[in-house]
Amino acid sequence: MRRKIATSTAALTAVQVFPFYGGRPASAPVTSPSANPVPFAGVFDEAGDLLLTEAGPSTVTAYHLAPDGTLSVIGSSASDGKTAPCWIVGVDGHYYGTNAGSANISRFEAGSSGVPMAQTAAASDAGPIDMAAGGDYLYVQNAGADTVTGYAVDPADGALRQVTSVTGLPAYDNGGMEGIAVN
């Protein structure tokens, strides 16, 4: 059985799991409470646990996904001390979250018990709202600056090194870019 994760926009304190059977999602989600307000985006780590950003307190929390679709919190949440973490993606076992409100990128590593630990952040252009990974690279959409920035990810320690920046993109607030994908 494969699962897709979607956060609840109604309550802002719940996460919904839609089990997939035969390639089709279930008609109703399995709803679990989130550890913190405003669950936003998630990614599965190498152990199969869900790392979920929570924009309210600026945290990432690890959840175990049970076979019935329920989620349970693993340990405590990790705060990066920044503002409004949105998207989270994984590259080579390192996990990165964009902080739209503080214009940077935080790195999270899984601790020995699976609990995420916040690491150093890299600076970004204004308003990083989305990102995607491709190979050993991380690409960040910066809506406040109308740019996309590319970073090489050091596979050993997860450090980010900026390798490119695309400027002159359509303004976000004028019908410009919304989302990014990498192939």
Image: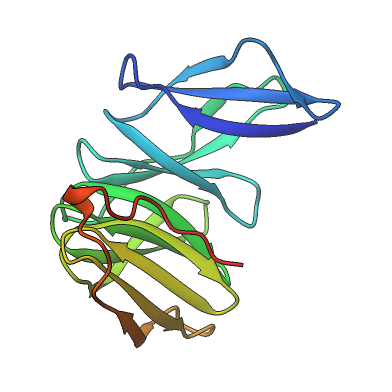
In terms of image quadrants, where is residue 96? Answer: bottom left
Q: Position of residue 54 (x, y in %)?
A: 31, 39
Q: Is 59 located above or below residue 37 in the figure?
A: below
Question: Which residue, as the protein is rendered here, is positioned at the far right?
Answer: 22
Q: Position of residue 120 (x, y in %)?
A: 27, 72
The quarter of the image holding the N terminus is: top right
In terms of image quadrants, where is residue 53? Answer: top left
**Whether residue 140 can be seen here:** yes
Question: Which residue, as the protein is rendered here, is positioned at the far top?
Answer: 28
Q: Residue at x 45, y 72 (%)?
A: 138
Q: Nearer the viewer, residue 132 or 80?
A: 132
In terms of image quadrants, where is residue 57? Answer: top left
Q: Residue at x 50, y 78 (%)?
A: 137
Q: Residue at x 52, y 52 (%)?
A: 113
The tally of labels here is 0
Q: Position of residue 24 (x, y in %)?
A: 77, 24
Q: Nearer the viewer, residue 51 or 168?
A: 168
Apparent side of residue 8 relative to residue 124 in the rendered image (left or right) = right
Q: Position of residue 133 (x, y in %)?
A: 52, 67
Apparent side of residue 18 relative to residue 50 in the rendered image (left or right) = right
Q: Is 79 located above or below residue 105 in the figure?
A: above
